[in-house]
Image (cartoon, rainbow, N blue to C red):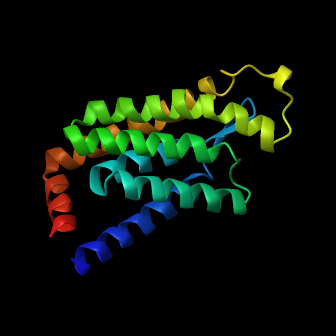
Amino acid sequence: MRSISTKKLALAGVLCAVAVVGSLFSFPVFSSKCAPVQHMVNVLCAVFLGPWYGVAVAFVASLLRNLLGLGSLLAFPGSMCGALLCGLVYWKSKNLLGTLCAEVFGTGIIGGLLSYPIAIAFMGVVAGSIGYTAYVVPFLVSTVGGSIIAGVLVTALKKSGALHSMQATLSR
């Protein structure tokens, strides 16, 4: 049991580091920084670690990105909602396409809508200057890109047989 936890914690740390370093490759869309690598990490966490590790990795990566000036407060609702939803879908169904769609919906729609009150309360954005859907489009752009990258990566791992091997290593 301890060995499994250690392996999962180590992989979570590596994926968190990938998300933080990957945020150097971000691009602005309106007032948010779109970092597709975070969404790829969310899907990888769902496939290898499960929903709870995924949410923890998303939270720690968002915190570190904010502390390092690489992200905004909007990283929290976007990445965490996506990580939770895609983690739950993969946990229950083991369906990659459903997992990718859950990441896009969780981050793009739910995270985008939850960003509106955060922008108003903590970022000094005047409520009348933006609509409640203002963050949906930038989040969708970011998460679709990251989900495509993750889909290609997981499919390649699956075809090579490495996916099953890696998942088995994390469960014994």
Taking the spot 86% from the left edge, 39% from the top edge, the residue there is: 124
The answer to whether 114 is drawn above or below residue 51 in the figure is above
For the C terminus, the image quarter is bottom left
Q: Position of residue 64 (x, y in %)?
A: 63, 62
In the image, what residue occupies the spot 37% across and 29% down? Answer: 101
Q: Which image quadrant for residue 115?
A: top right
Counting the numbered discs, the total is 0
Name the residue: 52% across, 55% down: 19
Viewer-closest of 110 and 7: 110
The quarter of the displayed image where residue 162 is located? bottom left
Quarter that holds the N terminus: bottom left
Rendering coords of residue 40 (x, y %): 43, 45
In the displayed structure image, the side of residue 164 where residue 117 appears, left or right: right
Could you say which is closer to the camera, residue 11 or residue 93?
A: 93
* Vertical comparison of 170 with 2: above or below: above
Residue 164 in the image, given as x and y percentages of width and height: 14, 54
Q: Is residue 56 above or below residue 172?
A: above
Question: Residue 141 location, x and y as percent?
Answer: 55, 28
Q: Is residue 13 left or right of residue 34?
A: left
Identify the residue at the far bottom of this view.
2
Residue occupying the point 42% across, 44% down? 84
Q: Is residue 110 above or below residue 172?
A: above
